[in-house]
Image: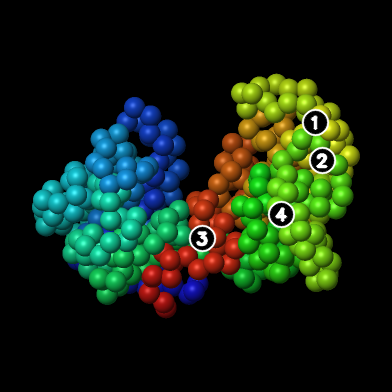
Amino acid sequence: MLNKKTVDDINVAGKKVLVRCDFNVPLIDGKITDENRLIAALPTIKKLINDGGKVILCSHLGKPKGEPLPEMSLAPVAKRLSELLGQEVKFAPDNEVVGPNAKAAVEAMNDGDVVLLENTRYRAEETKNGEEFSKDLASLCDVFVNDAFGTAHRAHCSNVGVTEFVDTAVVGYLMQKEIDFLGNAVNNPVRPFVAILGGAKVADKLNVIDNLLAKCDTLIIGGGMAYTFVKAQGGSVGKSLVDDSKLDYCLEMMKKAEEMGKKLLLPVDTVASKDFPDPIDAPIDTEIVETNAIPDDMEGLDIGPKTREIFADAVKSAKTVVWNGPMGVSENPCLAEGTIAVAKALADTDATTIIGGGDSAAAVNNLGFGDKMTHISTGGGASLEFLEGKELPGVVAANDK
């Protein structure tokens, strides 16, 4: 699955190259408020320009559900990309994406030119992987490059369907990096391998827990999902988040860890409060309690100081660390200490550190530790499915080496 052809394996001189990017950026009043995804796409785009390809970019933005909604147009992306690349990115506004404007713009291209198509989700078939739209996209190009890991877990026209109608389909640098780090870290890790899972619900991470337990040496569980494990062991967790339907599953996982000789670490102390913060960043009164003896009128909202030390200690000797999910309600300064402690432990280690997208990626970046991590995944859902050991349609569709 992971030995895919990349942009380095092909010659695009004089060829029309369709590149699926992830330009699903936040927009407020037509202004891009976070351009990390644009910057992440630049190395692949520049490589194709320098090699003399005619570069046609496509992406979705938001969920217009097959309607051409002006507020979800990619026009602002074309403008900003032109500035970032130092050359014009010609925007082709077509409600049907591959329409007269797109066809004319592609027809007029010289080697090294860049065109951006309109939001692929303006077409209802995009998310259903409809054949007609896949053929329309393929009709524009000689070569297809997928560089959008964020949608790799979905089989859509612009990342999977199109590959059936082009001879050459490869991955870009961003996709390659995700495959190298996430895929190989889990399937072929340098040991000791420590996996850290947080977030709210056990149900969201059932398959991840199962898959990682088989592959890691130590599994650390924090965040809201830890309380279901604690309750399964007979602990009192007060008003903390618990999934009663998963108690047996948690016991099964703890037994499995023991039988396989793996360490499974749970919080021993907890930052608890009588009320959940409202709004989420509002100051609240907290106290430190033992995790298996949380008072009935309190709920656990972050890992306590002893647990922070235990978790940080487990990371010190690791050679590979994968982290997905915060240790508490990290949006609140009173409840972010656990997540900060884990981020610091990862920043201080020499291990390969991989952050699995979503909330943990946001937390690491917001807390200022982003540049200390080996790799921060660009795809929340996609990285979770990778950690579950699933095949991602967008990766599978690319040509093998």
Residue pictured at 68% horizontal, 51% vertical:
202
SS at mark 2? strand
Mark whose residue sits in front, 4 or 3: 4
Residue pictured at 70% horizontal, 28% vertical:
276
- Label 2: few (<14), some or many (≥20) within 10 Å? many
For the residues marked 4 and 3, what is the alpha-carbon distance in whole angstroms? 31 Å
**Sequence order check, earlier mark of 4 and 1:** 4
- Label 3: few (<14), some or many (≥20) within 10 Å? many
Mark whose residue sits in front, 4 or 1: 4
Residue 302: x and y in percent read: 75, 37
- Which quarter of the picture shows residue 292? top right
Pointers 3 and 1 in contact (CB under 8 A)?
no
Residue 336 position (above or below residue 60): above
Disc 3 target residue = 178
**Sequence order check, earlier mark of 2 and 1:** 2
Left or right: residue 368 compared with residue 318: left
**Residue 43 in view (yes/no):** no
Pointers 4 and 1 in contact (CB under 8 A)?
no
